[in-house]
């Protein structure tokens, strides 16, 4: 007889079916369990479950069938042993840090991180005695030197980076981390497991903002951490169980539906973003395009080897600073002016005043976030319509 694992060996099959357990009603679609608590057959069974002696549902803060299905499916897609779902992507980052680190520990982090992650690491973790050192994403000598400092317990990187599409060699970072006795945590938000699987390249943990491509339609907020059974299944899960930054059953169900079409959507995002990036590169009003799918991007070869696609985020720089960038953004009629990404609808934003607006000028400079930078998350519309909408503003700017 064929095992479940053999029957679901393909990525797309796992995206549709992994983790599902039908109830006695024999439903085909996964059910939502909108309940705060679960009943027990006896006081003894309740005691056994609370003590961890018997598996089973207890309370939806940390045991809910719909959330469990999402976790098992995402873990299957990333190749991890366990997954913990959280209320947001930032809750996933926080839960990872506070679930695994203690006062006196040290993180080495890339300067090319999402703005709110930068703020968390700079403003809040030091309050709890967790030190953070900063290095450029692709300066591997700097990673080695920083990781060698005593007390380093975690290396944290986002690859490809948001919004510049910088790409780090995950295998190389894993070697640096493990040589120092530290963990490598990779934010895989822009690629998702459909395009990149960091655990297979030596990373210890993978972070997701499920809000983005895992949902794919901008409907819900959520996050996840994927990794091994001990760190994720016990330690980080223990933090989420106690502190409570949990995912709701309804949001988990929405993300499950998103996972079913993840591979299809990511292929379309890559194709559309590539067309937009190529057009932008040839536009006289554009100074520079940041998209690893372009052959002249400094990390194109690594991204082509490490990823199965280049993603849907394209950033570009125009002359004239903030005024020119805002003009391009405000002139669009179809693109949604919002800082979210990974939506079926194309979105456009000015990173310096939105996603990275809360960090210092020094941090923006280190991350390469200039006033003339515009980020587009290319959606599932016809790319020709996205191009036509961008041309409304770019066509009225002078050539660079």
Image (cartoon, helix red, strand yellow):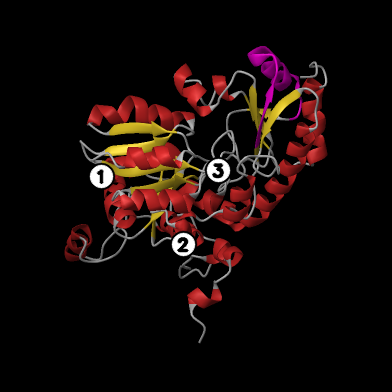
Q: Earlier in the sequence, mark 2 or mark 3?
A: 2
Where disc 1 sits, the SS reads: helix
10 Å crowding of disc 2: few (<14), some (14-19), many (20+): some
Q: Is residue 144 left or right of residue 49?
A: right
Q: Earlier in the sequence, mark 1 or mark 3?
A: 3
Q: Residue at x 30, y 31 (%)?
A: 125
Question: Given this view, does label 2 or label 1 mark the residue nearer the observer?
Answer: 2
Residue 208 % position (x, y): 47, 46
Q: Closest to the observer: 71 or 304?
A: 304
Q: Over which residues does the magenta segment extend?
A: 314-334
Dot 2 corresponds to which residue? 79
Residue 303 shows in this picture: yes
Is the residue 229 above or below the residue 87 in the image? below
Is the residue 27 above or below the residue 37 in the image? below
- Residue ranking furthest to the bottom: 1
10 Å crowding of disc 1: few (<14), some (14-19), many (20+): few
Q: Which mark is residue 242?
A: 1
Does the segment drawn in magenta span residue 216? no
Q: Is residue 98 left or right of residue 292?
A: left
Q: Is residue 158 left or right of residue 177?
A: right
Dot 3 corresponds to which residue? 167
């Amino acid at each position: 007889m064929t095992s479940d694992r053999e029957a679901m060996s393909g990525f797309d099959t796992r995206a549709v079916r992994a983790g599902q357990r039908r109830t006695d009603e024999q439903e085909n679609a996964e059910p939502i369990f909108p309940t705060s608590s679960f009943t027990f057959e006896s006081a003894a069974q309740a005691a056994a479950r609370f003590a961890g002696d018997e598996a089973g549902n207890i309370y939806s803060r940390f045991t809910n069938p719909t959330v469990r299905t999402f976790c098992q499916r995402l873990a299957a897609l990333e190749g991890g042993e366990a997954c913990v779902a959280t209320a947001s992507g930032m809750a996933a980052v926080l839960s990872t840090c506070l679930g695994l680190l203690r006062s006196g520990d040290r993180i080495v982090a890339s300067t090319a991180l999402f703005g709110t992650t930068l703020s968390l690491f700079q403003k809040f973790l030091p309050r709890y005695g967790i030190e953070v050192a900063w290095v450029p994403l692709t300066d591997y000598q700097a990673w080695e030197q920083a990781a060698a400092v005593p007390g380093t317990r975690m290396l944290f990187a986002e690859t490809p980076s948001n919004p510049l599409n910088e790409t780090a060699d995950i295998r190389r970072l894993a070697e640096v981390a493990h040589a120092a006795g530290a963990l490598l945590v990779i934010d895989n938000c822009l690629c998702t497991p459909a395009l990149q699987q960091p655990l297979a390249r030596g990373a210890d943990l993978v972070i997701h903002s499920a809000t983005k491509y895992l949902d794919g339609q901008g409907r819900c907020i959520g996050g996840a951490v994927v990794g091994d059974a001990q760190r994720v299944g016990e330690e980080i899960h223990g933090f989420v169980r106690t502190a409570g930054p949990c995912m709701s059953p309804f949001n988990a169900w929405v993300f499950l539906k998103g996972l079913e079409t993840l591979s299809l959507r990511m292929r379309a995002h890559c194709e559309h973003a590539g067309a937009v990036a190529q057009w932008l590169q040839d536009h006289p009003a554009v100074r520079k395009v940041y998209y690893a799918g372009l052959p002249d991007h400094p990390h194109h070869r690594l991204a082509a080897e490490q990823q199965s696609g280049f993603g849907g985020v394209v950033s570009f720089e125009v002359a004239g600073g903030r005024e020119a960038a805002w003009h391009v953004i405000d002139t669009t009629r179809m693109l949604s002016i919002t800082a979210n990404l990974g939506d079926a609808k194309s979105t456009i934003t000015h990173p310096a005043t939105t996603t990275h607006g809360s960090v210092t000028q020094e941090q923006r400079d280190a991350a390469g976030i200039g006033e003339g930078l515009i980020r587009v998350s290319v959606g599932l519309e016809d790319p020709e319509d996205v191009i036509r909408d961008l041309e409304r503003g770019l066509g009225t700017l002078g050539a660079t």
